[in-house]
Amino acid sequence: MPRWNPAGLHCYVTGGSQGLGLELALLLVKERAHVSIVARDQSKLDAAIRQLEDVRVDESQIIRAYSFSLNTAEGAEAALTAASVPHEGRVPDALFLCAGSARPGFFVEETPAGLQSAFDNVYWVQAWSALTAAKTYAKQRAKGKIVFVSSTVGLMGLIGYSSYAPAKHALRGLADTLRSELSLYGVDVQIFFPPTMQSPGYENENKTKPKITLKIEEDDKGLSCAVAARGMLEGVKQGQAHITADFINTLLRATMRGAAPYNNIVLDTIYACIGNIALPDWRRGVDKLIVKHRKEHEEYLQQKGFWND
Ligand SMILES: NC(=O)C1=CN([C@@H]2O[C@H](COP(=O)(O)OP(=O)(O)OC[C@H]3O[C@@H](n4cnc5c(N)ncnc54)[C@H](OP(=O)(O)O)[C@@H]3O)[C@@H](O)[C@H]2O)C=CC1
Ligand SMILES: CCCCCCCCCCCCCCCC(=O)[C@@H](N)CO
């Protein structure tokens, strides 16, 4: 299969105002793509556009920002329609659905409304864009690409991520389904599983992250968003269905593949063997750490007034 090349194509990057999405948008602009970024905060979009303009290679590149909330079907549709205007109404050649946010916490402290809004912020924030794009690809008889962004905790579960991990797993289910179904229209579907990335969103979630989750993650320095974006784009170019950019997520990917396509049958089999031994070993350590944390957790709940009502 020939490598995918973004030069001259219209790439639509949600969450393109900061973090992974911005770093990916920068790479795409450097590779001569037309780039549209979408996020809510206009001032962050303005700052991002200045950075993207700085790396423009060609006068003819169309580089635009659009402020929309992608949490609703209407918002996602309006954003895609707006971004298509400078391209004669044509659907973008590729969508990179990077938008999403995490709000870690303990399950027993969650509320029904909180859990539902988390699904909006993690699953629907990408799925609505895929829905409107898929319909438009089919109607316009256009070929294209949709790339979702999941997480390490789209491949496993970890204390503190009960509102987030299920939605990231659901994105994998959607990506696998659409990889199968959208081949009807010549639309490629891929999904990236990033590890921890040093981003504004990560710094923000750490402010309220449970202590035990912080402890489990403490040795994990994560990737810079620039390195993660490079790994993501490389996997996209190679046409990988499931993309990873670091060793741990590669082990998780290889052990969680199921019927998904191999990236490399020999290497993936080796990674799965390593993962089958190393991952349960790591998990046993984490399980022990959590049991040891019981007393401190009880004190935390006491302090929060958990037993008061
Ligand atoms: N950082 C990490 O450790 C990891 C992150 N991920 C995932 O990778 C992706 C990128 O993460 P990261 O770079 O850290 O994210 P950041 O939180 O730093 O940036 C998120 C981007 O998405 C935009 N966004 C968020 N919600 C919406 C919305 N409802 N509508 C429109 N735009 C929105 C934000 O802009 P604005 O708020 O202005 O709308 C911003 O541009 C996310 O999907 C995240 O879940 C996965 C694994 C690890
Ligand atoms: C040999 C086996 C060793 C395995 C080590 C695994 C260590 C990983 C623990 C951290 C996982 C948390 C990632 C969540 C990232 C994310 O999506 C949020 N930060 C959202 O922004």
Image: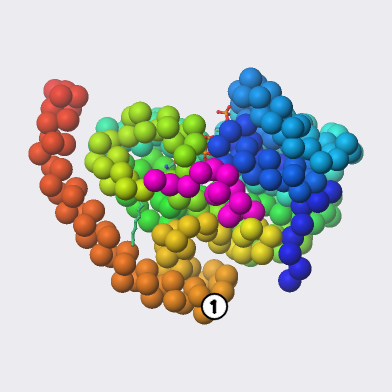
Chain part drawn in magenta = 221-233
Query: Between 250 and 301, which is closer to the camera in this rendering?
Result: 250
Task: Please state if 268 lies on the left or on the right of 263 as rendered.
Answer: left
Crowd tier of the residue under label 1, counting other residues whose Cα lies within 10 Å: few below 14, some 14–19, many 20 or above: few
* 76 in relation to 271, above or below: above
Q: Residue at 26% of width from left, 59% of height from top?
A: 283
The residue that label 1 is drawn on is: 265
Q: Residue furthest top?
A: 43
Count of numbered badges drawn on the protein: 1
Q: Please name the amino acid that badge 1 sits on.
A: Ile
Asked if the magenta segment contains residue 309, the reply would be no
Q: Position of residue 103 (x, y in %)?
A: 40, 34
Residue 274 figure quarter: bottom left
- Which structural element holds mark 1? helix
Q: Position of residue 117 (x, y in %)?
A: 46, 33
Query: Magenta stretch: dominant SS?
Result: helix
Residue 210 figure quarter: top left
Query: Between 301 and 4, which is closer to the camera in this rendering?
Result: 4
Q: Position of residue 190 (x, y in %)?
A: 62, 58
* 244 in relation to 304, above or below: below
Residue 91 appears in the figure: no
Q: Residue furthest left?
A: 295
Residue 49 appears in the figure: yes
Q: Residue at 75% of width from left, 42% of height from top?
A: 29
Task: Please state if 79 lies on the left or on the right of 41 as rendered.
Answer: right
